[in-house]
Each structure stands twice: as C-alpha cells, then as structure tokens.
Image (cartoon, rainbow, N blue to C red):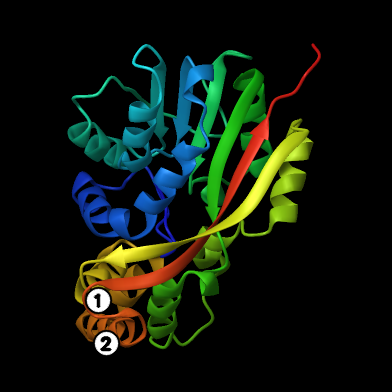
Amino acid sequence: MNDTSTVVPSVDISEDTAANYDQFLGPLFFEPYAIEVVKRMDPTSVSTVLEIAAGTGRVTRHIRERIPASAKLVASDISEGMLGEAKKKLSHLNIEWQNIDAQQLPFNDNSIDLVVCCFGYMFVPDKPKAFAEAYRVLRPGGMFLFTTWDKLEQNAASYTSRSIAKAYLEEPLPESYNLATSMSDETVIGQLLQDAGFSKMIIEKVKQFSVSPSAKEAAFGLVEGGALIYKEIKKRNPAWIAEIKIKVEKELAEKFGDAPMIAPISAVISQAWKVTNK
C-alpha cells in the first residue's frame, strides 16, 4: 500500500518497516479512504473479490467486513513484508493472501466480481497492461474500484513535509520521487480505462482529512515512514533527520493544530464496470 509521502512498495520491505508504516501512516492517510471505498461496494453482488496492493491490510479489513461471509477475498501485494504485517493483524479473518504483480494477474478470464486497489497503480510501471489485466479477470458487470492520490499540494501534511525536506537536497528531485501523486488527472485515468475496455465509469476527486493525535506523531510518521526523499537525506547526513522532524512538527502544529493535527487530503476515486455483450 502507498501514500502521499512517496513510499514505493518493493519486494524488500521488511515487516518492521511495514509495521511502522501502518502504525503512523495508516491512520493518517489510508483509513479515511478505506471507509470511502467500501461505501461504493455493493456486497450483494460479489462472491469473489481481488484486492491489489493490499499493503498492511487496512482496506482489506474493511472489505472483509463489508462483503458476505461466504464471499472469497484474495488480498495481494508485491511486497512480502507488507503482506506479512497484514497477515499478523488479520489472521483471524477469512482472507486468502497472495504475492501478486498487478501487471500479470494469476486468475482466469471473467472470474472476479470486484477488483479493488487503494493507492497502488501510481507505482505500476506498465499501467495499460495492469488495467487490461483488471478488465480481463472481471466478470461481465464486475466493478474495478481504485484510488490514486491527488496533486501533492492538495495533500497538506505531505506537501509540508516534502517542502522542508527538499531544502536539504541541492539538485532537483528525480521524477521517481513524484510517483505517488502521478495519477491525479481524471482525464488520463479515464483514457487508461477506456483503452483497457471499460465504457462505464465514475471518476471523482474526494477530499478528506489526515488526523493524527499530535503534530509530533505526524512528523515522525512522515519522516520515518520510508519516503524516498528521507532515505536519500539519511545517506547524506543522518543528523539532518532529527532537525527535519522538529521543523515538520513545528510547521504542522502551526498550520493544522498541535493535538490533534488535522490536515486536508485529497484523492481520486475511480469506479469502472465491465460492460460486454459477449
């Protein structure tokens, strides 16, 4: 699972990192949209659900609670570390866990009622292929439901953190650092869906709030949550990290409150249905 601070899931994420990610960034960024996403699901129409980029299982839990007890839920991620953390948290629930690449889904054509992915497709290298795979595995009438982050400046806590961190790196940031917010254009998303075969879709920007018990906790999560920019800063001078945390905490508290800290966030929620006469 991914976030506005540009954490890129990879197969080498440790369970310790995943646990930290879930503890601090989960409530801050993902919980509000997990609730939004399941609202858009019709539990009466699903018997098999596939979740892509399940991460540490925040959305997974809400899906499992929303769908019928008899329905099958396959929760997948490309990172074994993320899945390991999710399995520990949700071991009591009826969930099938799989390590899966979104660009090559190991399922038959027309075999899934609902494909869900929260904040994962921004990081997929071949998006047309991944969207085509989602279309392929969906049954006629099935829904593809996914979220991507809006522009960085619309996600205030992340924007604040990134702006402070950038001052510590002299050269321009590589484009890879902007992947988390690289799918904010509804027109581009709509074209990807059309090209994959979808003809019926709803794409909307939905605003929410990042809520943290304190600005200090939010600053810790943003800086220690695995963002690429902070990994680069640590390589150059680890001592800068403590300094940055203080600056991020101060600015977050001034702008969005000290305890709790409440900052605006925005994401794109996309729904597309497989409509076919075949």
The numbered disc on residue 154 is none
250 in relation to 274, above or below:
below
Dots 1 and 2: beta carbons under 8 Å?
yes
Task: Identify the element where label 1 is drawn.
Answer: helix
Q: Residue at x 78, y 37 (%)?
A: 195
| Label 1, residues with CA under 10 Å away: few <14, some 14-19, many ≥20 | many
Quadrant where the C terminus sits is: top right
How far is mark 1 from mark 2, CA to CA?
Answer: 8 Å
Residue 175 at x, y percent in the picture? 57, 67
Q: On the rendered structure, is 107 left or right of 235?
A: right
Q: Which quadrant of the view contains residue 84?
A: top left
| Residue drawn 28% across the image and 19% down it | 94
Which residue sits at x=34%, y=79%? 256
Which amino acid lies under the numbered mark 1 shown in the image of this protein? Ala
* Identity of the residue furthest to the right in this view: 277
Q: Nearer the viewer, residue 59 or 1?
A: 59
- Few, some or many C-alpha atoms within 10 Å of disc 2 (few <14, some 14-19, many ≥20)? some
Query: Is residue 10 visible in this depiction of the protein?
Result: yes
Any mark on residue 215, and which?
Answer: 1
Mark 2 — residue?
A: 250
The spot of residue 253 in percent (x, y) is 28, 83
Q: Do we see residue 55 in this rendering?
A: no
Q: Is residue 210 left or right of residue 41?
A: left
Q: Quadrant of residue 162?
A: bottom left
Q: Amino acid at mark 2?
A: Lys
